[in-house]
Image (tube, grey):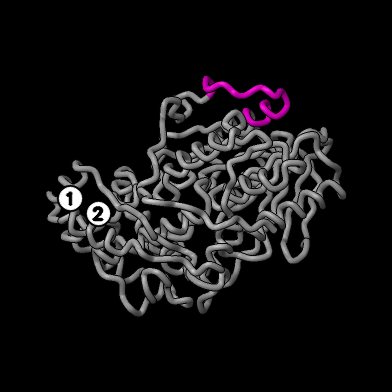
Amino acid sequence: MFHQAITRKMVLLTAVFLLTLVQPIYATPQAELLLEGEIDGANYRIRVPDGWDGQTLVVYAHGYRDKADQPGQTDDHTAEAAPGGTAGEDAFLAAGYAIAGSAYKDNGWAVGEGIEDTHALVQFFNQEVGAAQQTILLGGSMGGLIALASGERYPNVYDGVVALCPPAAGAPMSWDGALVFALAYDVAFGWPQSWGSVADVRDDISFQGEVLGPVFAQTLNPANRGKFEFIRLVTGITDKEFMSGNNWLFVNMFYATEARAELERRAGGAPTQNRNHIYRLSAADKQYLATLNVDAEALLGEMNGRSTITANPTARAYVEANASLTGELPLPVFTAHTSDDGLVPVNHEAVYRDQVAAAGSADNLFQVYTDSVGHCAFTAEQVELVLAELLQWVVSGERPLTTPFTPSLGFLPDFTPPGWPVDFKQFTHLPIIRS
């Protein structure tokens, strides 16, 4: 049932957004202008096709990169101008787009840096190359949140936003989800004291050195399957993710431990909370877990009895600022999500849809879904179509139709994302701090 081996590299390649364009959009890139350097400590990369018509600049916001905070690690500050590395850049360039991307000045949960470093890059492009008729911001995973937040903050800079597999429910709910995962693991297996507490992980915890080995050993015991299924179900991860392998488990454990520790250091305390959460499972889920010798009611009772964790106010304010979303969309926004995403569940899209509707901006949001398993598991053709439809929307002012997003291309036209897996007795955000 379980993989026999997994390495840190495999985990992080799944955890970050590394969209592979499996086919070039066009044959070959044209000759180009290449600009590389540093802006206020952030490496950048710009590529402009020869004879560029000045129409479209696509700015890329990359996803989460692990911060080099463990012995032997080095930070990756490679700037990419499009998703998919050089092959992806070539495809965008061949399509006639000017492209640009910032590495951000820091790694880890660098949402604030990503927003401002990407904004600075656009200003630099406008000065050195010339302003495009349309500037489109495309981001994936954490970069998708950067893109959505940037569209709210700088509507006069960007003309449209494409967010691929974004944590669109916002950082507070996303990181509270990591706490849910940690708590579910604790009631199922027990959280070692050496890792810190469920509410506040040890700031220098090493996923590879301390967490991966014990968790992997637990996966080797078939008797533990029910416990892992309980964790999956209570956190809203689909069964297709489970059947595709257990990378979802290791990736989420990385974010629940080492990545959360990095966030706690930068935020000045533990920013996650579960006060007033109500953890639940359907009757069918409980019956299924019973066949695996798991008393779901007992485990849920333990979790609900510990819905008292309150965040450090300063740390919570940091996460709210980096970033909560208002749902107010002054420009066209496209989101795309796989139906079975084990890291950033598609439930995020339901939260974002409702938030945008409540803000009166539903006409500026277009959401599409693909029949894929995994985080950001899109094809080049799917990304090309989303970008092309967003551009047509920006230029024409006419909202796209659903007809181009066909099942033959892997889209799910009638898909409705499920709601958030946790209920709230009372849920409020702390005030959003804008820089």
Q: Which residues are magenta?
A: 389-404
Q: Earlier in the sequence, mark 2 or mark 1?
A: 2
Q: Nearer the viewer, residue 351 or 128?
A: 351
Q: Position of residue 148 (x, y in %)?
A: 61, 45
Q: Evaluate if marks 2 and 1 touch, with contact meaning CB atoms under 8 Å apart.
A: yes
Kind of residue sitting beneath label 2: Phe
Q: CA separation, marks 2 and 1?
A: 7 Å
Relative to 418, does residue 234 appear above or below in the rendering? below
Disc 1 crowd, CA 10 A, few/some/many (<14, 14-19, 20+)? many
Verify whether residue 395 appears in magenta.
yes
- Kind of element beneath mark 1: helix
**Which residue is denoted by mark 1 in the rendering?**
289
Q: Residue at x 36, y 49 (%)?
A: 422
Outermost residue toward the front in this view? 426
Q: Nearer the viewer, residue 274 or 91?
A: 274
Q: Position of residue 103 (x, y in %)?
A: 67, 59
Q: Residue at x 64, y 30 (%)?
A: 388
Q: Does residue 201 show up?
A: yes
Q: Residue at x 58, y 56 (%)?
A: 431
Verify whether residue 364 appears in magenta.
no
Q: Residue at x 53, y 49 (%)?
A: 141
Q: Quadrant of residue 390?
A: top right
Q: Is residue 292 left or right of residue 250?
A: left
Relative to 209, does residue 118 appear above or below in the rendering? above
**Which residue is denoted by mark 2 in the rendering?**
230
- Which quadrant of the figure contains the C terminus? bottom right
